[in-house]
Amino acid sequence: MNAAVPVIGVVAPSGSGKTTLLRQLVAVLRQRGLRIGYLKHAHHSFDLDVPGKDSFELRAAGAAQTLLASRERWALLVEEPAAVDPDLNAMLARFETAQLDLILVEGFKHARYPKIEVYRAATGQPVLYPTDPDIIAVASAEPLPVVPHPPHLPLQDVPAIAAFILRQVAH
C-alpha cells in the first residue's frame, strides 16, 4: 500500500451509489482543504478519446502510449492488454503523491486496503462486511442486516462520512 498518501476505498455492488457518494465526498473534503486523488476500477474497456480525433486514430494504429495534453489537464493512456484486472498497488504507484493528501478508490473490492461499504437493501445484494475484514465502516440509510458490523455511517450525512475518513487517516 502507498505509505506516502492515505488510501480509503468505497465498495459496493453496481447501482449502490458509490460514485454519487464519492462525488459528494470529494467536494466536502476539498472544501476542508484536502487535495484528493481518485482511482476507479472499471470492469470493462473505456476510452477517454473519441473516434475521428488524431490521438484516437494514432492509438488505434498501434501507439503503446498516448498522452493528451492541454492548458487545463493531461492524460496518459497506456495500452496494456492483459487477462487479469489491474493491481491496486501498481495503479496507486502511478499517482504524483507529493500533490495529494488522500486517495479515494472506487472498487478494487477484493484488494486488501481500508474500505467503506455502501449498502442498499434495494439492490438485493448481500452485505460485504461479514467476509471482508478490511471494511472499516458501512454507509447506509437503513439498518445493517448482519450483527456484529463495523461502524454504521448515515449515507445521507456526507460531512459525517468525511469526518470519519479524516479520523481514519489521522492515525
Image: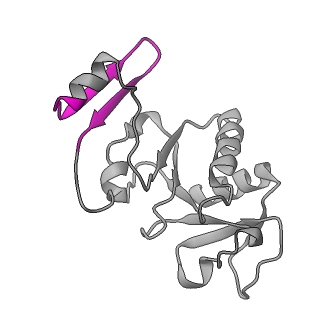
Give me the residue at 22% from left, 23% from top: 58
Residue 163 horizontal side relative to residue 6, left or right: right
**Magenta part of the protein: which range?**
60-79
Give me the residue at 68% from left, 45% from top: 25
Indicate the position of residue 132 as horizontal and vertical percent values: 53, 79
Name the quadrant containing residue 108. bottom left
Indicate the position of residue 12 as horizontal and vertical percent values: 60, 65
Which quadrant holds the C terminus?
Answer: bottom right
Q: Is residue 41 above or below residue 124?
A: above
Give me the residue at 49% from left, 67% from top: 109
Which quadrant holds the N terminus?
Answer: bottom left
Residue extending farthest to the front is: 52
Q: Is residue 111 above or below residue 32?
A: below
Q: Nearer the viewer, residue 35 or 105?
A: 105
Name the quadrant containing residue 15. bottom right
Exactly how many numbered labels are in the figure? 0
Indicate the position of residue 105 as horizontal and vertical percent values: 51, 53
Q: Is residue 19 above or below residue 59?
A: below
Q: Nearer the viewer, residue 74 or 171?
A: 74
